[in-house]
């Protein structure tokens, strides 16, 4: 480009980090001149907070309502880039890397601006692992296990019932582990994460549920079709 306009923008008000402390950084906003095509987005680098070394193969992704997730993996220099984004007042970005605490940060995406040199720091994380089994110690395959955090991907148990979730923040007071399977009632339990670089072992026992049969009628006793029936803890009744 023959000409660029540079301005420095503080991220203190635009970026929110969970569950770690608020992320503060300095970036450069670049506007092309009118003879060039304007782009919208951001680019930056993911580094280890303790030594500022770049982290390669970290996944940086964002979720767009009603649209496919867009994702980028950092290169050998820890860099990532998102261009041609839609302007958005508040856009969440998630950063996941093996061995590090997962993070969520927030940016305001402004039309015709590319935020450059965004620096995202990760700290060493911990892991929770375990086996999902029935009351007879038989491993359960196909159970979905997740923590109630925005940054951690759900995992599905293998034939041996094992699961492993990485990216937990050792400084976080308590996590909730949620386990579901089509043949069992959902199960949730709380736990405190292990220290950085360590693994907490947490087994889960799923117990068979009961089946309830009934009929929905109106005030005159006539059957009412197409009614959703759920218990009070079901997601169907949250709204």
Image (cartoon, rainbow, N blue to C red):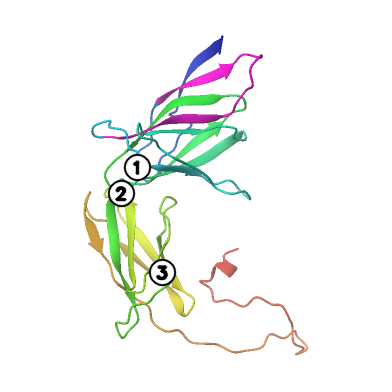
Residue at far front of view: 76
| Residue 48 falls within the magenta-colored stretch | yes
Q: Which residues are magenta?
A: 26-49
Q: Which secondary structure, mark 2?
A: loop
Residue carrying label 1: 20
Q: Which secondary structure, mark 1?
A: loop
Q: Which secondary structure, mark 3?
A: strand
Image location (x, y in percent) of residue 107: 50, 34
Q: Which mark is residue 179?
A: 3
Q: Is 110 on the left or on the right of 143, as rendered?
A: right
Image location (x, y in percent) of residue 39: 60, 26
Dots 1, 3 in contact, CB < 8 A: no
Residue carrying label 2: 169
Image location (x, y in percent) of residue 5: 54, 12
Image location (x, y in percent) of residue 114: 54, 25
Give the image quarter of residue 109: top right
Q: Residues within 10 Å of mark 2 (few under 14, many from 20)?
A: many
Q: Nearer the viewer, residue 75 or 26?
A: 75
Q: Earlier in the sequence, mark 2 or mark 3?
A: 2
Q: Which mark is residue 88?
A: none
Q: Earlier in the sequence, mark 1 or mark 2?
A: 1
| Residue 174 falls within the magenta-colored stretch | no
Give the image quarter of residue 140: bottom left
Question: Label 1, label 2: how many angstroms apart (C-alpha)?
Answer: 8 Å
Q: Residue at x 32, y 54 (%)?
A: 166
Q: Is 36 on the left or on the right of 184, as rendered?
A: right
Q: Residues within 10 Å of mark 3 (few under 14, many from 20)?
A: many
């Amino acid at each position: 480009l023959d000409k660029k306009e540079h301005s420095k923008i503080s991220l203190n008000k635009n970026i929110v980090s969970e569950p770690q402390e608020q992320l503060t950084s300095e970036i450069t906003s670049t506007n092309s001149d009118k003879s060039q095509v304007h782009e919208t987005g951001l680019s930056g680098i993911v580094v280890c907070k303790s030594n500022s070394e770049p982290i390669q193969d970290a996944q940086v992704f964002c979720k767009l309502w009603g649209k496919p997730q867009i994702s980028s993996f950092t290169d050998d220099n820890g860099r990532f880039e998102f261009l041609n984004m839609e302007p958005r007042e508040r856009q969440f970005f998630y950063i996941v890397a093996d061995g590090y605490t997962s993070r969520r940060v927030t940016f305001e995406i402004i039309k015709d601006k590319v935020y450059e040199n965004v620096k995202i720091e990760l700290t060493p994380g911990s892991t929770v692992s375990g086996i999902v089994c029935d009351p007879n110690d038989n491993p359960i395959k196909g159970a979905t296990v997740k923590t109630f955090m925005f940054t951690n991907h759900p995992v599905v148990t293998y034939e041996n019932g094992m699961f492993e979730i990485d990216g937990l923040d050792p400084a976080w007071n308590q996590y909730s582990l949620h386990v579901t399977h089509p043949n069992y009632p959902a199960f949730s339990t709380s736990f405190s994460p292990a220290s950085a670089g360590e693994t907490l072992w947490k087994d889960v026992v799923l117990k068979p549920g009961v089946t309830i049969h009934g009929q929905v009628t109106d005030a005159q006793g006539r059957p009412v079709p197409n009614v959703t029936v759920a218990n009070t803890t079901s997601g169907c009744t949250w709204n």
